[in-house]
Image (cartoon, rainbow, N blue to C red):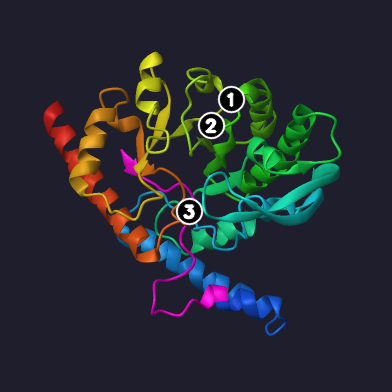
């Protein structure tokens, strides 16, 4: 049993610390600093996000996605066939993203996240996983003005993003996570999703994670277990029904167990984490558990995110020892 995170991390520190990332972005947009200066600040804030995860004791970290404008724009800007439109609300959160508009044939031109991954790996003493927004989520949060159907659009995105996954694997990424929160909201499109996942992962030699959040997998479980992923991430906070969903069939893969509430400032106690781990371990054995927040932590104040990770790690360590003792 290990601890991990889902992806993003707060970019803005708690007051009175200066918000150097936001300040740098504003200065760049006004032409007061150049891109190189902005990248240096992004490097600094990324290192801070990595340090927070390491100091908390998280076993498998990410780079915090500090460089991402949002999970859609970061990829759509760098894929062929898109332009970027105005702001749209991101699911039912209080954050917004710029809507990608597909106006031509979608294609992968060059690595998008490889340099980010290699930078994080060079600054971490723990394993780092790469994260890519999946084709169903990118497709359903974009406006499609080119492809006749959602199916054709999502499959085209899967082919394009397959290039990114292959590039990450070639760069040494041993764990690659595909974020697909849209699956919880578009279960009627599961057939499209399943076909796209086959295209997306073809020829990729890495441990593959499917991360779902903002809902449950009722209606598509146990079908998701047949997808080409080694680890399935499920949200047990917004998707509290997942507790019942898992009772429908044996869980045969590794579970990324999203139990730390990524959208609530209340810091869980280690005892609450212990209780949740004990409960899930009756369904999924500890050796196939990765305990995590329910989603990315960017929605939280910086200090709260840090305290939540520390509580998560402490709770998992306590639960691990208790479960070992029970088996002895």
Q: Are marks 2 and 1 in contact (CB under 8 Å)?
A: yes
Q: What residue does disc 3 label?
A: 62
Magenta stretch contains residue 251: no
Q: Main secondary structure of the magenta part?
A: loop
Magenta stretch, residue numbers: 1-22
Give the number of the disc on residue 187: 1
Dot 3: element: loop
Q: How far across and how far down the image is residue 186, in percent?
A: 61, 29
Q: Residue furthest top?
A: 249
Q: How would you rate the neighbour count of disc 2 (Cα within 10 Å): few for under 14, some for 14-19, many for 20 or more?
A: many
Numbered disc in front, either 1 or 3? 1
Viewer-closest of 52 and 69: 69
User: Residue at 84% of width from left, 41% of height from top?
Assistant: 145
Q: Earlier in the sequence, mark 3 or mark 2?
A: 3
Is residue 296 left or right of 22 when viewed as pictured? left
Instruction: Give the residue at x 53% y 21%.
Output: 220
Q: Is residue 260 above or below residue 245?
A: below
Quick one: SS at disc 1?
helix
Quadrant placement of the N terminus: top left
Q: Splitting the image into 4 quarters, where does residue 205 fall?
A: top right
CA distance separating discs 1 and 3: 28 Å
- How much space separates mark 2 and mark 1, taking CA atoms? 6 Å
């Amino acid at each position: 049993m290990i601890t991990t995170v889902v992806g993003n991390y707060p970019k803005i520190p708690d007051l009175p610390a200066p918000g150097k990332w936001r300040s740098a972005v504003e200065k760049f947009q006004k032409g007061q600093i150049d891109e190189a200066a902005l990248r240096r600040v992004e490097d600094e804030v990324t290192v801070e996000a990595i340090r927070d995860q390491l100091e908390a004791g998280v076993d498998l970290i990410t780079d915090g996605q500090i460089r991402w404008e949002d999970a859609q724009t970061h990829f759509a800007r760098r894929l062929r066939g898109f332009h970027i439109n105005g702001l749209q609300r991101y699911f039912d959160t209080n954050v917004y993203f710029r809507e990608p508009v597909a106006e031509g044939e979608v294609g992968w031109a060059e690595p998008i996240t490889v340099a980010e991954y290699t930078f994080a790996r060079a600054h971490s003493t723990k394993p780092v996983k790469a994260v890519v927004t999946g084709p169903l989520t990118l497709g359903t949060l974009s406006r499609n003005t080119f492809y006749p159907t959602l199916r054709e659009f999502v499959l085209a995105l899967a082919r394009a993003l397959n290039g990114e996954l292959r590039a990450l694997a070639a760069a040494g990424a041993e764990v690659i996570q595909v974020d697909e929160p849209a699956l919880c909201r578009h279960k009627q499109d599961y057939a499209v999703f399943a076909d796209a996942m086959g295209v997306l992962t073809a020829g990729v030699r890495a441990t593959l994670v499917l991360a779902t959040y903002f809902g449950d997998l009722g209606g598509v479980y146990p079908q998701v277990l047949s997808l080409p992923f080694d680890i399935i991430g499920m949200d047990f906070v917004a998707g509290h029904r997942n507790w019942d969903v898992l009772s429908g069939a044996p869980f045969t893969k590794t579970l990324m167990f999203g139990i730390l509430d990524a959208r609530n400032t209340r810091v869980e106690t280690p005892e609450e984490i212990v209780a949740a781990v004990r409960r899930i371990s009756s369904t999924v054995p500890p050796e196939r558990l990765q305990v995590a927040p329910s989603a990315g932590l960017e929605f939280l104040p910086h200090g709260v995110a840090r305290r939540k990770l520390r509580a998560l790690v402490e709770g998992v360590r306590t639960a691990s020892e208790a479960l070992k003792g029970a088996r002895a």
